[in-house]
Structures are given as C-alpha cells and as structure tokens.
Image (cartoon, grey):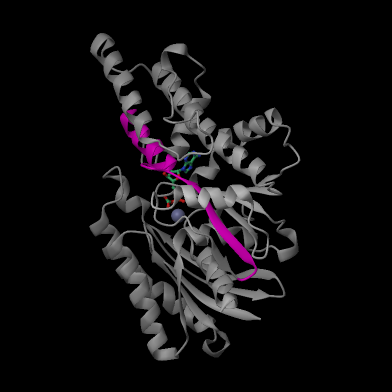
Amino acid sequence: MVRTLAIETSCDDTSVAIVSHDAGNFSVEHLQSFSQIDLHQHYGGIVPEIAYRSHAEKIVPLLASLWWKAILPTLDCISVTASPGLPGALVVGITSAYSLQAVSGLPVIEVDHIMGHVFSVLLERSREELALPYVCLTVSGGHNDIYLVQDKDASHTEWETQALRHKKGHMSVWSSHIVWPFRVTKLAQTMDDAAGEVFDKVARMLDGPYPGGAWIGEQAKLGSADPARTFHVAAHHDPSGLFSFSGIKGQVHQRIQQWVSTHGELATDIKHAIAYGFQEAVVDALAKKLVYWADRCSAKTIWLVGGVSANQRLRVVLQQHLEKNNKTHIPCLLPTQFVYCTDNAAMIGACGLVMQMTK
Ligand code: KG4
Ligand code: ZN
C-alpha cells in the first residue's frame, strides 16, 4: 500500500487530500476543499491577487487538520500541483509541499494539473474496472484537451506516430508520457479559450452569474433552435484538429449588439434562444472531436472530466454522435463523484501515486 498527502492550489480551489493505493484500488481517505467562487463572483471572473491571498490564508488550516489524521510515518510522498495554473496560486501549494518535506523528509511529487484530471477516473475504482485504452475530455474554465490513455506497452499506431510528428513544434506537450502502466498522449487541445471560459463570458454578456456554465444550461432549456441565432465553432469541419472557442464569443457579442441597436434591451426569449444556439455549437464541437478520437483509437471508454462535464446537453449530444457513428458500445463515464470532476486534491494524489509507482 502507498499513501500520499495531496495539495491543489492552481486556480480558485484550495484543496488537500489523503489518497492511498492498494492492489490496483485508489481510495480517497480524506478530501477537504475551500472554493473561492464567492470571493470572485462579484468581479465576474477570477482575480489573481484575491486568489493568491485566499490560498495563503486557507492552506495552513486545511493542512493542519489532515496532517495529523495522516499519521505521518504512514505516508510515502507529498503530491502537489506544480503547473499549469496561476503562478502565485501554485507557489502557495508548492511552498507548502516543500515545507512539509523539510519536516518529514518525504519526497515531493510535482504533478501536472491536467494529468490529475486524466487520472481522476481512477479514484474509488479498481484498476480492473478501467478498460484501456480510454480517451478523456478534460474541459473546464481553464483547459480543454483530449487525451488517450493506453497500456504503456501498447504498440504505437501509425496515426499516433503521425499525430506526434505533425503536431510537434506546434504545441508544447504533444509527446507521450509513460506513467506506471500507462502511456498518455495528448490528442487535441484548444488553440485559444477553453469551453468553460466561453460559457462564463457568454453568461456575462447575457447578464448571467459567474461562473455561468450551469446558468447557460438552464437558459438553453427554455430556448429552442432559431435560424437567426445559430453559432459556429471555428475549424469545426476538421475533427482531428485543434479546438477553437474564441470566435464564437465574437459572434454572440455581434448578435446581441445587432438586437440591442434595433430593439433596445435583450428580450428574455432572445436570451434563451442565444443560450440554446451557443450551447448547441459548443457541445457539438466537443462531442464530434471526442467521438472521432474514440473511434480512431478504438477506445473502450470515453471519460468526461472538468466542470463542463456537468453539462447535460453535452452527454446527450455525445450519445447522438456515438449513435451516428455506430459506436454506442463505447460507454461515456464520469468519475465516481462529481467533486472529483472539478478541481480537487484527490485527483492530484491519484496522479502523484501513479507517478511514484513509475519511479
Ligand atoms: O473544473 P472547474 O470547476 O474549474 C476550473 O475552471 O478549473 O470548472 C468550472 C467551469 C466554469 O467555467 C463553469 O462555467 C463550467 O465549468 N461549468 C459548466 C457547467 N457547470 C460548470 N459549463 C457548462 N455547463 C455546465 N452545466
Ligand atoms: Zn482543472
């Protein structure tokens, strides 16, 4: 059995956890988080300075409660999110991890936040339940990627070699990573905004709350297809290419301006129609690319992780794309609890243990 204390402070959640691994099972022994949403809501987005100060204020009390429960000698390592994220926010977690190392002598495992999301699917599940290969859409306010996770010894397919060659130089992290019995390869990422980010920005244009993803979903349920309010995701015609969600913000903005200049304030039914058209375009782009890669990689499972995976329409549209491609035998799954989908330290612990076992 191996156990880790895990710390996540990359964005607007201060989170600590204790995760253990035994014979293929990853258990979450403790998980405590503080969400900063109430602090940022008023500003309509994350204010880095507020985020840093809040992490600094919350991390010690959160760790103090876990540290003693952890029974120090039973821990094998400390896992901490090292990147990507807000620099000042990451520094709080990293400094805490190395301070704990100074008093305990435990090794620190620096975890990539997105890899944490990719391995969140392991939590509270046995290794046998995890059918390989799987593709995983990690989609939130800050990131928007598709990864392939396969057995580390699986042969490199022709497309994988081609994709890596083609994409090298274009993006920073296209190479495959071997961690424990897995090989992880990035298949797609956004070239600009993440889907959650545009949900939040469009919600703001429609006078909705922050974060706005769930609100847009509710507004869209009250709307329906309207030819005057359809939107397009750039480069959507190429299912193997990169995501791009920046352009759709401009389209929504333009339609709102057109309406306001001729009719005055936005009518409620127009807001509903815009939310509907916008959500359809975004979830269709996500689902289409995901099914393309699941098919191409002969995936046994599709996983959805990150805040946007809460979107119910995304799951429906994904199912429709699977039906259209005769791939309904591929199950679409979410981590065992929704708290493991959004930013949390338990997923950092799972990834840290996977990395520890690679050593
Ligand atoms: O993973 P997360 O909690 O935090 C990070 O951004 O890292 O994801 C939050 C994002 C926000 O952009 C929020 O608007 C979006 O997930 N979100 C949704 C829904 N619920 C949350 N987007 C679309 N539909 C939803 N139901
Ligand atoms: Zn995240």
Seen in the picture, residue 280 relative to 82 is either above or below; the reply is above
Where is residue 88? Give x, y as percent.
28, 64
Magenta-highlighted residues: 180-208
Above or below — where is 4 with respect to 220?
below
Q: Nearer the viewer, residue 247 or 178?
A: 178
Q: Residue at horizontal 23%, vertical 13%?
A: 261
**Would residue 83 be found to the left or right of residue 126 on screen?**
left
53 is higher (above) or lower (below) than 109: above
Q: Position of residue 251 (x, y in %)?
A: 34, 24
Q: State the quadrant of the C terminus.
A: bottom right
* Residue 126 appears in the rendering: no
Residue at 50% over, 43% down: 308
The residue positioned 54% from the left and 72% from the top of the image is 355
- Give whichever of 140, 359 is nearer the camera: 359
Residue at the top extreme of this rendering? 262
The x, y position of residue 164, in whole percent, is 51, 52
Q: Is 321 inside the magenta-drawn segment? A: no
Q: Is residue 276 left or right of residue 10?
A: right
On the image, which quarter does residue 202 sit in?
Answer: top left
The quadrant of the picture showing ligand 1 is top left
Image quarter for residue 48?
Answer: bottom left
The x and y percentages for residue 111 are: 46, 68
Q: Visible in this render: residue 251?
A: yes
